[in-house]
Amino acid sequence: MLNETAYALGSNRSCIRDLFEYGRQRAAVVGPENVYDYSLGNPSIPSPPEVNQTILQVLQDTDSLAVHGYTSASGDYDTRKAISDDLNRRYQAQTRPEDFFLGCGAAPELVSVFRALAVPGGEVLAIAPYFPEYQPFVQEAGLTFRAVPPDVPDFQISLEAVAQMLNPHTQALILNSPNNPSGVVYTRQTLQALADLLNRKAGEYGHPIYLISDEPYRELVYGGAEVPFVPHIYPDTVICYSYSKSLSLPGERIGYVYVCADAADSGRLLAAIAGAARGCGHVCAPSLWQKVIARCAHLRPDLQSYDRNRRALYEGLTAMGYEMAKPDGAFYLFIKAPGGDAQAFSDRAKEKDLLLVPGDGFGCPGYFRICYCVSYDMIQRSLPVFRDLIQGA
Ligand code: PLP
């Protein structure tokens, strides 16, 4: 006998992966230059050169047993201190190394946080459009996943919708800004209003409602957009951070969970997150990468090529009549499907070897996502195809 939920999760391939595989097959047939693949969010800028240099330095100047050995489950103190110092410098924050738990990227960190908050009947809210994996993560933790309808067309947060869905069973709300798939950055004003609402409701229910701030795109912002440090606005916050996008290290699996010391029950919450991770088989984050991050926590990505892509697409597509919210962060655009049916539009695009992800999986039908971690040349070649599609050709 098998666990059927696990089987379903493992055997139903994601639509994004399917499109990506399809793109590879088509490239072999029609040539890679004739396929315009906007499906997968794999970083396309190299890690800062200091990262690779640091790997070599660590290998040279650190005892091999220490480099490759187990660390404590919450991670090397020096690494947590470097991350804490960097955040304190940037945000005038007062984080402490003991407030951090080093994890293997945002995905397993989120899983641990959901499991730590899993009480019978508990619910978690996610604001549409949202990262599709939240749903299985929350449900597998034993919580109920509930999607808050999108704030169309700006994709900030509809407070009325959140207010309607909050109830005494609400354990947490997931926040993801800069957002996958919309590219939108929630403004300080939006976050402040959300915090006021959550404070009011938490007071009414007599228990905290945690904000789980999923921040793999925190450093990916353009044109000076502000990404506020959420715990300053709402102390009952847990940050799940990852170096997958900020340092282009998605295959290395390194990040951290931060629980603000001022959060309700912060000590017990962090212990429960560590315990939940343990229950999922967490031993420690990769040791070599902990040592690299201890020396690289201050590095930021060079965003020039993402920004050039973003502007080329945003300006090019809006001039053709496509509609989308202003993409100030991450590396995605979330575009209203002409005709209203995103699946039908994506199918038409696919016939022209233009690969777009329909928004249904993000909890937002009628829109499609494009990921602009691609070459500038591909964007230029794809623009006439977008024009043909909107003109119905
Ligand atoms: N959260 C969001 C919003 C993402 O887009 C991703 C990856 O694309 C993740 C979490 C998982 O990232 P990680 O590689 O850190 O597990």
Image: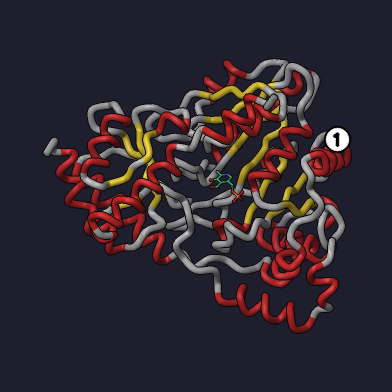
Where is the C terminus found, in terms of image quarters? top left
Front one among 1 and 159: 1
Question: How far across and down, in percent of the image, does residue 225 sit?
Answer: 48, 52
* Residue drawn at x 79%, y 60% as measured from the top left: 80
Reply above or below: 198 against 265: above
* Residue drawn at x 21%, y 52% as measured from the top left: 383
Q: Secondary structure at mark 1?
A: loop
Quarter location, residue 11:
top right
Question: What's the residue type where badge 1 is placed?
Answer: Asp
Q: In the rendered image, which residue does mark 1 sit on?
A: 265
Question: How far across and down, in percent of the image, does residue 85 sit?
Answer: 75, 63
Front one among 175 and 3: 3
Reply above or below: 75 against 10: below
Where is the N terminus found, in terms of image quarters? top right
Q: How many marks?
A: 1
Front one among 31 and 265: 31
Reply above or below: 226 against 76: above
